[in-house]
């Protein structure tokens, strides 16, 4: 009886037993519909708000073991990629499934470098934003607007066209981000310098002033490239779920990336790096840490230790470990961020406090990244833009995988209806009388 890849469910409402196949540690939710009380019964569904225990897809891109704190892109450990790879090489790996050959990487890098410019009309669109418009609001709007410049992007099943727009998005996200930043500080836009590296060009578009050519600091250029590697993908996170859900309607990639960017904007997701810096600035001094931690523990959940906790990691986020080391290298160039001492004290207390230990709350990718971004001179409301740039490669890899998955169709969850039973229309003159 044992050793079979099935489970048997006994429905105690009817006494009937059902044997369901188990595949990859899951049962097909649709198999539950066989479990009925009578012929008129719709059959069982699962109720899983926020998909805490639901696999929405099969994917070969990123593997996470939350208990062991493991993260691998296409089988390669994140720690090795952060040490030995580059963001564009990792983008290729995520998209194609293998590390590129030297020729493939050279060609990919060339194609990305010649697609960094934006249509001049987009500058007029961006001029319409207030000077204090949030950079993420500008980014998601401008990416969405890009879809109107490339109507052929709708040909999502034409592999050549699809690949062209994947490259365009990876190439243009840094340019849009840099233009957004320059708009927010009232500086003229700096056009791409295609002789520079992906992150070198981005820093040039962000920082260049009157000098003939921006001189890239190699330590900062590499630090940003490593941060981009660490943020490139993370399996079925909230924004990737948005990318897949919108993409399942066969929406073009620009509009789908705009939707994913909107999800990343949320403070519980990519917006957490900005929230961490706000939290550290509000703390202001290491002596305020104990009282803050007490508030978090005794509150009803509205005050959180931002940058801590994760739906999947119930151990240290391996990206946080790499970022923490990277911070020291950056601070040697930029000078130590005074908020680091407060962050380290928050971590020290949290890792020994039962409230956090019991809930397995550890620093995640957002806890230390903001300290580096601030040391690089970026405003905190720009931090999530720095997350969106590299994550575009992951979103596009997941989107491509969705389109080639025969199991997939338009995403359309069910619901448990808790509303009013059927009732007749009430004429307006009688309504006050009937409202309970
Ligand atoms: C990212 O999914 C991904 O992969 C995302 C990401 C990626 O690369 O795409 O890794 C990037 O989004 C990282 C997470 C960034 N967000 C934050 O740092 C915001 C602070 N953290 C949380 O709000 C929270 O930890 C989440 C949203 C990240 C995870 O939330 P879950 O899995 O839904 O957990 P939960 O909200 O149900 O919390 C479980 C318990 C609760 O307490 P009880 O109700 O059991 O008493 O833990 C508590 C929560 O109140 N809790 C926290 C906490 N996070 C959870 N308490 C204090 N501080 C926190 N940060």
Image (cartoon, helix red, strand yellow):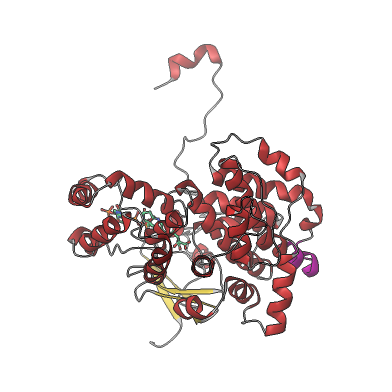
Q: Residue at x 21, y 46 (%)?
A: 295
Quarter of the image for residue 426 reads top right
**Ligand 1 placement by image quarter:** bottom left
Residue placed farthest to the top in the image? 429
Q: Residue at x 53, y 51 (%)?
A: 263
Residue 13 seen in render? no
- Residues 409 and 125: in front is 125
Magenta segment, principal secondary structure?
helix
Q: Is residue 160 magenta?
A: yes
- Residues 16 and 351: in front is 351
Q: In the figure, 13 relative to 61: above or below?
A: above
Q: Which quadrant would the N terminus be assigned to in this image?
A: bottom left
Image spot of residue 61 (x, y percent): 56, 74
Image spot of residue 16 (x, y percent): 42, 68
Residue 125 falls left or right of residue 431: right
- Residues 291 and 239: in front is 291
Q: In the figure, 203 relative to 80: above or below?
A: above
Quarter of the image for residue 154 reads bottom right
Residue 36 seen in render? yes
**Start-end of magenta stretch:** 156-165
Residue 150 falls left or right of residue 417: right
Residue 123 falls left or right of residue 221: right
Q: In the figure, 432 relative to 91: above or below?
A: above
Image spot of residue 283 (x, y percent): 27, 46
């Amino acid at each position: 009886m044992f050793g079979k890849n099935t489970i048997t469910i006994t429905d105690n409402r009817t006494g009937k037993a059902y044997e369901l196949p188990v595949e990859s540690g899951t049962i097909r939710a649709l198999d539950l519909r066989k479990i009925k009380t009578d012929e008129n019964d719709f059959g069982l569904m699962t109720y899983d708000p926020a998909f805490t225990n639901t696999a929405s897809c099969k994917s070969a891109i990123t593997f996470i073991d939350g208990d062991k704190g493991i993260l691998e892109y296409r089988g390669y450990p994140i720690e090795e990629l952060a040490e030995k790879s580059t963001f564009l090489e990792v983008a290729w790996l995520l998209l194609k499934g293998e590390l590129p050959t030297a020729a493939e990487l050279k060609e990919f890098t060339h194609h990305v470098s010649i697609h960094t410019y934006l249509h001049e009309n987009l500058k007029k669109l961006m001029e319409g934003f207030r000077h204090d418009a949030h950079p993420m609001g500008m980014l998601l709007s401008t990416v969405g607007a890009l879809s109107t410049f490339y109507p052929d992007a709708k040909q999502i099943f034409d592999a050549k066209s699809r690949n062209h727009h994947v490259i365009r998005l990876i190439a243009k996200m840094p340019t849009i981000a840099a233009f957004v930043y320059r708009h927010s500080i009232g500086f003229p836009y700096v056009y791409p310098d295609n002789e520079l590296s992906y992150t070198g060009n981005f820093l040039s578009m962000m920082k260049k002033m009157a000098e003939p050519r921006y001189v890239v600091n190699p330590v900062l250029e590499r630090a940003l490239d490593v941060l981009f590697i660490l943020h490139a993908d993370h399996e079925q996170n909230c924004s990737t779920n948005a990318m897949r859900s919108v993409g399942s309607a066969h929406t073009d990639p620009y509009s789908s990336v705009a939707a994913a960017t909107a999800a990343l904007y949320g403070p519980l997701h990519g917006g957490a790096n900005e929230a961490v810096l706000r939290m550290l600035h509000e703390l202001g001094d290491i002596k305020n840490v104990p009282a803050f931690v007490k508030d978090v523990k005794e509150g009803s959940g509205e005050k959180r230790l931002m940058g801590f906790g994760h739906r999947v990691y119930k151990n240290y986020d391996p990206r946080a470990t790499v970022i923490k080391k990277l911070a020291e290298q950056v601070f040697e160039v930029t000078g130590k961020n005074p908020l680091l001492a407060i962050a380290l004290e928050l971590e020290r207390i949290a890792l020994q406090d039962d409230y956090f230990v019991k809930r397995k709350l550890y620093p995640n990718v957002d806890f230390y990244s903001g300290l580096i971004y601030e040391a690089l001179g970026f405003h905190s409301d720009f931090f999530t833009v720095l997350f969106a740039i590299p994550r575009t490669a992951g979103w596009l890899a997941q989107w491509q995988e969705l389109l080639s998955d025969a199991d997939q169709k338009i995403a359309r969850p069910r619901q448990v209806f808790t509303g009013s039973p059927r009732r007749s229309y009430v004429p307006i003159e009688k309504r006050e009388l009937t409202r309970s």
